[in-house]
Image: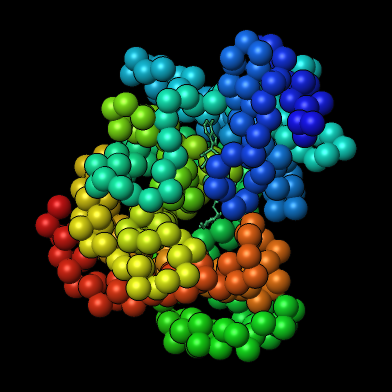
């Protein structure tokens, strides 16, 4: 029995569905691979509507962003159906479907390409940097006022810290006793929180339309050429900072181990990959300002800190946000982030020199 077969049939697909199978490693939505008897391939997603409370406006954002990027890709002579997400409409032309099972959307499956979980070849990381930089360029002339803020204050680290202290004091899971060292780690670094939000609010750093979730598995690389094909996972495209996009890529991609690796000896900050990413990103994003550039090295620390703090909060809340597959999954994730931070802090002078040199 295939699940969501009734939902799949409500989209304008070519043929009858013969495969509907769980797919990918996203922490937020439920993703399925769909194939039809005519060999047409799609991605079906059950949207996390607990988090994205206004699915209509979320999908309108994605529609606007993909139309805008698509136009640029078309003008550059690219293949629009492959180089950005393409929304498959429902039978009555909707951007999403509401059924008894929840909210669903469908995209054309980007074939012969992979969203990698780790960097196995530095060129992959360079390619992902170039893709996120190019994505940023596509959106440089996009009017931010047309975008709905899908998750307000997404990278407001000061607010994230407030949420964290609430999770600690409520201790809804009763797990606080297992995480006292980690809580102390966060508290000791509270001074990091306002550094970027203050620059944005004073106007010293430009507010851009950014992706905000730039991990390696949110970009597809061509299986044959290794070249970047498309930036995906557009749920959090909102006003933000280039430092958020840069820092989040560094957080995920420079880890020598997995984001949830329980053996911390395997988790180390790979400064060689930092350098590769910085070259790719700065090479693509010509409009970067001095203020942004000055904060890039630190942004890797900040975004790793913010994400680790979010994993820790979710562990204390009882795993209500990120999808988990084991009891201490969020705590394991938090610990890898903190191990990386310790490494990154030691090497901050070197990463700053790297940025200065490029
Ligand atoms: P989440 O928000 O849960 O992270 P994503 O949108 O990132 O969900 O999708 C999860 C995974 O599904 C991606 O990492 C990628 O492997 C795969 N995926 C998503 N969209 C497509 C697509 N259009 N074509 C091929 N694979 C996709
Ligand atoms: C989530 O959706 P996904 O799995 O690509 C999260 C990011 C975190 C990331 C940690 C909407 O990303 O903010 O950095 O997990 N996305 C959302 O791996 O909260
Ligand atoms: Mg994703």
* Along the viewing direction, whichever of 57 and 330 lies nearer the viewer: 330
| Snapshot quadrant of residue 301 | bottom left
Callout count: 0
Q: Position of residue 187 (x, y in %)?
A: 50, 85
**Could you tell me which residue is drawn at 55 percent across and 47 percent down?**
25
**Could you tell me which residue is drawn at 68 percent across and 30 percent down?**
20
Q: Is residue 130 above or below residue 118?
A: above
| Snapshot quadrant of residue 252 | bottom left
| Residue farthest along the right direction in this orientation | 100
State left or right for residue 316 relative to residue 200. right
Q: Is residue 286 above or below residue 300?
A: above
Q: Position of residue 135 (x, y in %)?
A: 39, 37
Q: Quadrant of the N terminus?
A: top right
Q: Position of residue 77 (x, y in %)?
A: 34, 15
- Does the rendering let one see residue 298? no
- Does the rendering let one see residue 213? yes
State left or right for residue 335 relative to residue 243. right
Q: Is residue 178 above or below residue 230?
A: below
**Could you tell me which residue is drawn at 72 percent across and 83 percent down?**
174
Q: Position of residue 259 (x, y in %)?
A: 45, 61
**Ligand 1 positioned in quadrant:** top right
**Could you tell me which residue is drawn at 77 percent across and 20 percent down?**
9
* Along the viewing direction, whichever of 61 and 166 lies nearer the viewer: 166
Which of the colour schemes (rainbow, by chain, secondary structure, one colour) is used?
rainbow
State left or right for residue 116 relative to residue 88. left
| Residue farthest along the front direction in this orientation | 1
| Snapshot quadrant of residue 192 | bottom left
């Amino acid at each position: 029995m295939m699940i969501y077969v009734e939902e799949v049939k409500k989209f304008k697909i070519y043929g009858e569905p013969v495969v509907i199978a769980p797919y990918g490693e996203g922490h937020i939505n439920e993703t399925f691979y769909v194939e039809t008897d005519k060999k047409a391939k799609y991605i079906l997603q059950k949207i996390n509507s607990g988090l994205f409370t206004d699915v209509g406006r979320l999908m309108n954002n994605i529609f606007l962003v993909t139309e805008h990027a698509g136009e640029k890709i078309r003008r550059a002579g690219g293949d629009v159906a492959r180089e950005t997400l393409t929304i498959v409409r429902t039978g009555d032309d909707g951007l999403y479907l509401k059924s008894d099972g929840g909210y669903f959307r469908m995209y054309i499956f980007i074939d012969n390409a992979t969203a990698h979980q780790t960097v196995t070849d530095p060129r992959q990381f360079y390619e992902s940097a170039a893709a996120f930089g190019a994505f940023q360029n596509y959106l440089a002339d996009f009017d931010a006022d047309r975008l709905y803020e899908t998750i307000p204050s997404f990278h407001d680290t000061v607010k994230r810290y407030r949420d964290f202290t609430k999770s600690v004091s409520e201790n809804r899971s009763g797990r606080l006793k297992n995480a006292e060292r980690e809580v102390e780690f966060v508290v000791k670094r509270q001074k990091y929180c306002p550094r970027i939000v203050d620059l944005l609010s004073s106007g010293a750093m430009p507010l851009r339309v950014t992706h905000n979730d730039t991990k390696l598995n949110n970009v597809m690389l061509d299986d044959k050429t290794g070249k970047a094909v498309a930036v995906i996972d557009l749920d959090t495209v909102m006003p933000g900072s280039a430092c958020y996009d840069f820092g989040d890529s560094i957080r995920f991609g420079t880890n020598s181990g997995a984001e949830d690796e329980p053996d911390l000896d395997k988790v180390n900050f790979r400064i060689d990959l930092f350098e590769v990413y910085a070259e790719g990103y700065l090479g693509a994003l010509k409009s970067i300002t001095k203020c942004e550039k000055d904060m890039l090295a630190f942004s890797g620390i900040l975004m790793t800190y913010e994400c680790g703090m979010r994993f820790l909060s979710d562990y204390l809340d009882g795993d209500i946000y990120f999808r988990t597959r084991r009891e201490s999954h969020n705590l394991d994730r938090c610990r890898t982030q903190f191990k990386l931070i310790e490494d990154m802090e030691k090497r901050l002078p070197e990463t700053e020199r790297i940025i200065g040199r490029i």
